[in-house]
Image (tube, rainbow, N blue to C red):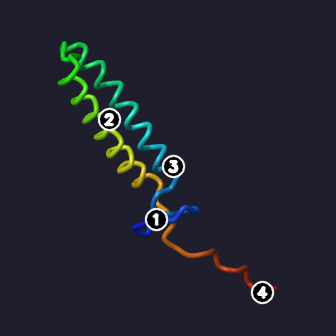
Amino acid sequence: MGNGEKSGSGGRIDWRIRFAGAVGGAVVGGLALLVLSLADLHLFPLGTILWVVAVGLGIFLGQFVGGRLFRPSSGGPPDPPPPA
C-alpha cells in the first residue's frame, strides 16, 4: 500500500468504497452489454473496447459515490465520560 492508504477502519481505501466500486463496475458493465447487444455493436474489437471502458468508468463512479457515502468521521476518539 502506498500514497497514504491505510488498511484499518477509516482508511482512504475502505472495504465499503472498494465494494461500491465493484458494484458500480458490475452494474455499468451489465448495462453496457445490454446496450451493445441492442445496438448490434457486440463485435469483438469495438464491443470489447467499449465494454472495458464502461466497466472502468463504472468502477471509478462507484468508488467516487462510495467515497462520498462512506466518509470517515472527522473527529477523533469520543470524549471520556465526566467524573462522578
Q: The residue tagged with tag 3: helix, strand or loop? A: helix
Q: The disc labelled 2 sits on which kind of residue?
A: Val
Instruction: Kindly give the residue lying farthest to the bottom in the view shown.
Output: 83
**Who's the residue at 43% across and 69% down the image?**
4
**Who's the residue at 19% across and 12% down the image?**
40
For the residues carrying marks 2 and 3, which lies nearer the camera in this image?
2
For the residues carrying marks 1 and 4, which lies nearer the camera in this image?
1
How much space separates mark 4 and mark 3, taking CA atoms?
37 Å
Is the residue marked by circle 4 packed among few (<14), some (14-19), or many (20+) residues within 10 Å? few
Tell me: residue 2, above or below residue 37.
below
Q: The residue tagged with tag 1: helix, strand or loop? A: loop
Q: The residue tagged with tag 2: helix, strand or loop? A: helix
**Who's the residue at 18% across and 15% down the image?**
39
How much space separates mark 2 and mark 3, taking CA atoms?
18 Å
Tell whether 76 sits left or right of 37. right
Number of the label disc, if any, that sits on residue 54: none
**Residue wearing tag 3:** 16
How much space separates mark 1 and mark 4, taking CA atoms?
37 Å
Front position in the image: 28 or 74: 28
**Residue wearing tag 2:** 55
For the residues carrying marks 2 and 4, which lies nearer the camera in this image?
2
**Residue wearing tag 4:** 83
For the residues carrying marks 4 and 3, which lies nearer the camera in this image?
3
How much space separates mark 1 and mark 2, taking CA atoms?
24 Å
Q: Percent from the top left, x then y, of residue 20?
A: 45, 43
Front position in the image: 60 or 47: 47
How much space separates mark 1 and mark 3, taking CA atoms?
14 Å
Q: Which of marks 1 and 4 is nearer the N terminus?
A: 1
Q: Which of marks 1 and 2 is nearer the N terminus?
A: 1
